Image: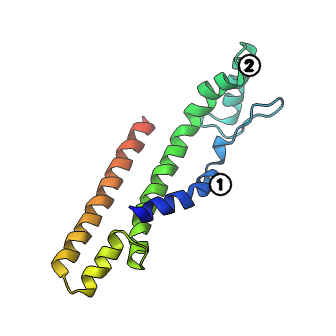
Amino acid sequence: MPGSMHTTQQRCGHLDEQCPHARVSFEAGTQTQSLDAGPIDALRVIDALRVAGASSPQVAAHVVLPSVVPQCIGLLLYRFDVNVRSSLVLGLVGAGGIGFLINQAIALFDFDQMMTYILMVLVLVVAVDVASGMVRRRLAE
């Protein structure tokens, strides 16, 4: 878990780079070109809300967020899955966590304990995959 937390913290900047659709400004003259409904439809909806008197937060809540949130959550789940797997590798090289315990069990020739740790990792990875798949399916509906 410590390795996963570290890599998650370290890679939060990558989410900003990989989710550019979330960076939308509603200042005068700035429009978004990357919404799911298509740029022309999205711009029409934004213009219609503006004409109706909607403020920038209302436009963001009713047009931008419904389009951007599923993409960003999917990316967040993917990065979390990668971080869980890379934390095992970090532990194997000495950063702590379950990878360190696996390495220690190998060094002590305690193969029963090593198999227990490996099965724990397998269960964790499968649980994260299943949970992220369920969330992605719900977002796709």
Whether residue 85 sits left or right of residue 60 in the image: it is left
Relative image position of residue 73 (x, y in whole percent): 50, 44
Identify whether 71 is placed above or below 31. below
- Is there any visible trace of residue 39 in the rendered image? yes
Which residue is depicted at the point 75% across and 15% down?
A: 51
- Relative to the observer, which residue lies in front, 104 or 26? 104
Q: Residues within 10 Å of mark 2 (few under 14, many from 20)?
A: some
The C terminus appears in which quarter of the rendering?
top left
Instruction: Find disc 1 in the rendering and name its residue.
Output: 17
- Is there any visible trace of residue 82 in the rendered image? no
Q: CA distance from mark 2 to mark 1?
A: 29 Å
Check disc 2 and give the amino acid type: Arg
Instruction: Find disc 2 in the rendering and name its residue.
Output: 50
Which residue is depicted at the point 30% across and 54% down?
A: 127
Check disc 1 and give the amino acid type: Glu
Disc 2 versus disc 1: nearer the observer = 1
Q: Which mark is residue 111?
A: none
Which residue is depicted at the point 50% across and 58% down?
A: 8
Identify whether 57 is placed above or below 74. above
Q: Secondary structure at mark 1?
A: helix
Labels 2 and 1: the sequence-earlier one: 1
Q: Quadrant of residue 40?
A: top right
Which residue is depicted at the point 67% across and 30% down?
A: 42
**Hey, which residue is sitting farthest top in the picture?**
52
**Hey, which residue is sitting farthest left in the picture?**
112
Relative image position of residue 75 (x, y in whole percent): 51, 51
Whether residue 106 sits left or right of residue 58 in the image: it is left
- Relative to the observer, which residue lies in front, 94 or 132? 94
Relative image position of residue 81 (x, y in whole percent): 42, 58
